Image (cartoon, rainbow, N blue to C red):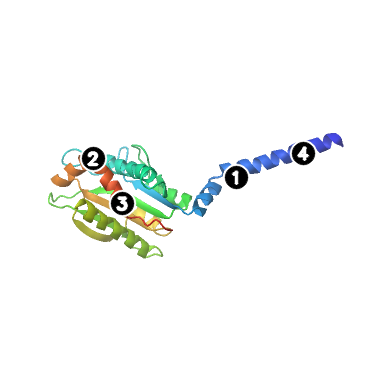
Amino acid sequence: MFKKEIVMTILSRCFIGLIVAGILWSPRALFSQLKESSKKVVVIDPGHGGSDSGATGINGIKEKNVVLKVAKEMVHYNQNLFDNAFEIYLTRSSDTLISLDERTKLAKRLNADIFISLHCNHSENPNAKGIEVYVSDRKGEHTNESILLAFNIQKANQKNLGFKSRGVKLANFQVLREGSKRLPSVLVEFGFLSNQDEAIYMAEEGNIPALALSVLKSINLSK
Ligand SMILES: [Zn+2]
């Protein structure tokens, strides 16, 4: 009898331990805790990566590197200037290629509030320049929020950095199509790497923080 009680106590403690460990380690529990916080969960998607360089500038800079730098700078500013106002996650934090599917799946797993894909533009026309921000052309419950965010980003970029605004556009991009079913999603095309002035701008390390800040300041703090 005595032995049986000891065994039962040990078993019950193990059981409680397993439950606690399960709560601590369960991604779902972790993410639901995040969701319960008042902070917006923001997924930043630096486009391309690894063997996919994206566009290459007339000065040799690669789109995949520019957008990763901007994304990391957004994380830095969120910590140091915005006092961690947002919960920011990157779909990639190094020069690796991940599928379009994985990028949107992360936002789903995190139950994120906003998805922002970062890109640089390219055109056969060397005079083409300016920022354009895309939202999905499939109307969904987050279309209006997506358009508002896209409008704010291109406006901040135009006002603060002097880029020409090419407006908010609709497109059937996979990352937007999948994402916008669940959350406000936009795809930012910073300037054109095929344009001399803008390629030089993107290549200048000192301009990366300005690009990061213009996007970060466009996100509404409240949920
Ligand atoms: Zn791109």
Per the model, the C-alpha gap separating discs 2 and 4 is: 62 Å
Per the model, the C-alpha gap separating discs 2 and 1 is: 43 Å
- At which x and y percent is residue 198? 17, 46
Per the model, the C-alpha gap separating discs 2 and 3 is: 16 Å
Disc nearer the start of the sequence (3/1): 1
Mark 1 residue's CB less than 8 Å from ligand 1: no
- At which x and y percent is residue 118? 31, 48
Residue ID for mark 2: 206
Task: Count residues near mark 1 (Cα–Cα under 10 Å), then give few for <14, some for 14-19, many for 20+.
Answer: few
* The C terminus - image quarter: bottom left
Task: Count residues near mark 4 (Cα–Cα under 10 Å), then give few for <14, some for 14-19, many for 20+.
Answer: few
Residue ID for mark 3: 215
Dots 2 and 3: beta carbons under 8 Å? no
SS at mark 3 in the image: helix
Dots 3 and 4: beta carbons under 8 Å? no
SS at mark 2 in the image: helix
Name the residue furthest top: 3
Residue ID for mark 4: 9
